[in-house]
Each structure stands twice: as structure tokens, then as C-alpha cells.
Image (cartoon, rainbow, N blue to C red):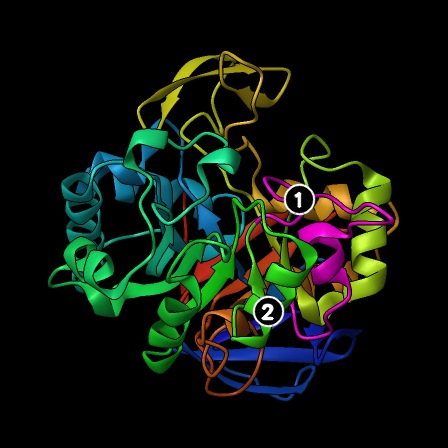
Amino acid sequence: MLIFTNGKVYLDGAWKTGLDVLVDGDRIADIRPRGTQKEGRIVDARGGYITPGFIDIHIHGSNGSDVMDARMSSLENISTFLAGNGTTSWLATTMTVSIPEIKNALHAVSDYMQDKSHKGAQILGAHLEGPFLNPLAKGAHVEEYIIPPSTESFEKITGETPDIVRLVTMAPESDGALEFARYLKDRKITAAIGHTKATYEQCADAMEHGMTHICHFYNAMTPLNHREPGAVGAILDNDSATIELIADLIHIHPAALRLAIRVKGRDRTVLITDAMAAAGLKEGTYELGGLPVFVKNGAARLKNGTLAGSTLTQDRALVNMVKIGIPSEDVIAMLTGTPAREIGVDGYKGRLQKGYDADINILDNEYQVKATFVKGNEVTV
């Protein structure tokens, strides 16, 4: 039995004192008044915070490795690095490359998920960011591999691994997008709007068809204008839409972050990293989706200046958001419970609750990660 004690416990969306979180094996056994459990190993939060582990549903790589490497060793490297920064589970996110390359990456992810001996953050599945995008909003994706969304193409890409896909990003104005969104919904896969040139009307229609998750909001989509509200306006105008935000203070101005959260709230906002291989490493030249990426002053860009993922970690996102004035209890929700709900794992991830997976972080009073447990096992990096 592990006894997490002497900290402010994140419970039901608020900080609570005088409680212990008890862990038996890989699950949370109970949450009780402090000191009522006498036997067990003490995990002392030293007056800091006890939170659920962070969940990153949009991340391509870190620490020199990329999901598109299609290697178990790369996935292990990423998972270990993430756990060292408080992320206890993640979606392995692909890029727009050839179908055989995406297929190989998904096979590696599937094999990794089946091997229970791995350490570090747990892979919960895959996020296909493309190839169903608008070429005019491609960002760092390779245009020649962009294709229209369809069930046939999806089945070619996923092959024998369709069950690991939890999230698919596409441009809703593409031919066949709405029909494909219904196909995904029937299979309990979240359909996301992203890399789009959709008008307000096209975006609103897509959300009516169930595409209510929004890939890296503001970025690679039609902006808000008072006469043509665009995708950004449609999303802000829809109470069901849940947005992803990259809180590196590079992709989005602090005022725009605050505005989005003021409209959406913590239950409709997910903090992602969209990190690429350079996360955790020094400045230099790297690669994302087959394209060279230049990292300088924390920003990852293509040669033409286009942002190409980020070097962000979720613990830094937490600190950044608190710094710009977002209450910490709201930020924790955006890193835990809300992403868990969006990919359908909220029945066992994203909360400190009896019976849930024992994914737990200890933070100090400056919100720095001091210890991380994945399913009850402390991660040592």
C-alpha cells in the first residue's frame, strides 16, 4: 500500500487538504482523512500538490525520437521522457506521410501497447493528424501525401490496427468528411477539426455532424473576422466544441489563451504539447514528417518560418498558464480529466478516484514535478 500524504489533493476539480490517497497495486484504493491508514509506504508531498497524471492527446515525439520512426525504442524513449515531466499517458500522433509509413508507425504503436514490460508514460492509442487535411492549411505536413477522407483510405492506413486509433484530425470542408465523421463516431473514435480553410458555415455544419473536438485551436484554421467569423468564430460560438491549446506562449498570445478559456472553460479545453523530437533537447536542426525543422529560442519552425510542432512539455504548460493568470485548479483539469473524456478513457484515467489507475504526480508549490507514478509505479528518470 502507498499512502500519498501531506499535500493538497486535487479532488473533484478543487484543492482539498487533510486527505490521503491510498494506492494498492496499480489502482487507487481509496481517499481517506489523513492518518487513518497506518500501514504502508509513505509518499510525502511536503506540503505541495497531489494531482492526477497529465494526459497528452497530441504529441509527435520528444528527446530525439519521433512516432514516425516506427520503432519500439523510439516509443520507449518518448514515454520515459514524458513521465519525467508529469505526463503519465499519451496518444502517439502521426504525420502526413505515405500510407505505408503511417501503417508502419501504427504497427509499432500497437506492438508497444501490447508489451506490458515498458516503463514510463502509457500509450493509450494513436492520433492520426492527417492525411485528411486541407493543402492550403497544411502547416508542417507534406502536401503530396494529403488525401480526401474516406473509410477506404482509413482502413488502408490502419490495416490490422484500427482499434488503437482514438482521434482523427481532418479538414471538415473536404469531400467525404461528414460521412467519414459518422463512420468514426460509430466506432467510438473522436473526429477532430483541424488544418482547415472552412468557413463559419462549413465548420458549424461539421460540428452538427459530431466533429466537436478541435485540433490545436487558432493554429492552421480560418481566423475570426467580424464579417466572416471563420472556423475560430464557429468554434467559439458552439458550446459543445472542445478545443486543444498549445500553451508554449509562442503558438498563441497570452491574451488569446485567456479569451479562449473564458469562452470555453476548463471542461472544454485540453492542453496539448504538439511536441516534436526536439522537445527536451538543445537548439539545432531536427525533422518532423520528413521536413527539416529549425529550433531556436524554443520555437520549432520550417525554413519558411511556419511553426512545426513545439518543444513544449505539459509541466511547462501548467506553469505558463498559471503565470498568465489561469487558476491552477482549472489548468489541472485541462491536463487530466478533460483530455481523458475526449478520448473515452475517463472511466479509469484523469481523476483521483477509487478504482481509477494510480497515475499520480507530486508537485511542489511552484508547480514543478517532483515525483510521478504510472499505475502505481514510481518513474525514475
Residue 363 position within the rendered picture, expressed as x and y whole percent measured from the top left? 66, 53
Amino acid type, callout 1 = Thr
Q: Residue at x 28, y 43 (%)?
A: 75
**In this orientation, does residue 353 appear?**
yes
Residue 81 position within the rendered picture, expressed as x and y whole percent measured from the top left? 42, 40
Queried whether the magenta region covers residue 222, the answer comes back as yes
Number of callouts = 2
338 or 145, which is in the foreground? Answer: 145
Residue 191 position within the rendered picture, expressed as x and y whole percent measured from the top left? 45, 65
Q: Residue at x 72, y 61 (%)?
A: 234
As drawn, 44 above or below 140: below
Range of residues picked out in magenta: 216-241
As drawn, 226 above or below 126: above
Side of 216 relative to 82 (left or right): right
Gap in angstroms between the C-alphas marked 1 and 2: 15 Å
As drawn, 128 above or below 32: above
Amino acid type, callout 2 = Asp
**Dot 2: element:** helix
Side of 381 relative to 323 (left or right): left
Tell me the crowding category of disc 2: few under 14, some 14 to 19, or many 20 or more residues within 10 angstroms, Cα based.
some
282 or 210, which is in the foreground? Answer: 210
**Dot 1: element:** loop
Where the C terminus falls, by quadrant?
top left
Q: Residue furthest left?
A: 160
Queried whether the magenta region covers residue 351, the answer comes back as no
Q: Quadrant of residue 207?
A: bottom right
Residue 222: mark in rendering: 1
Q: Quadrant of residue 145?
A: top left
Residue 205: mark in rendering: 2
Q: Main secondary structure of the magenta part?
A: loop
Tell me the crowding category of disc 1: few under 14, some 14 to 19, or many 20 or more residues within 10 angstroms, Cα based.
many
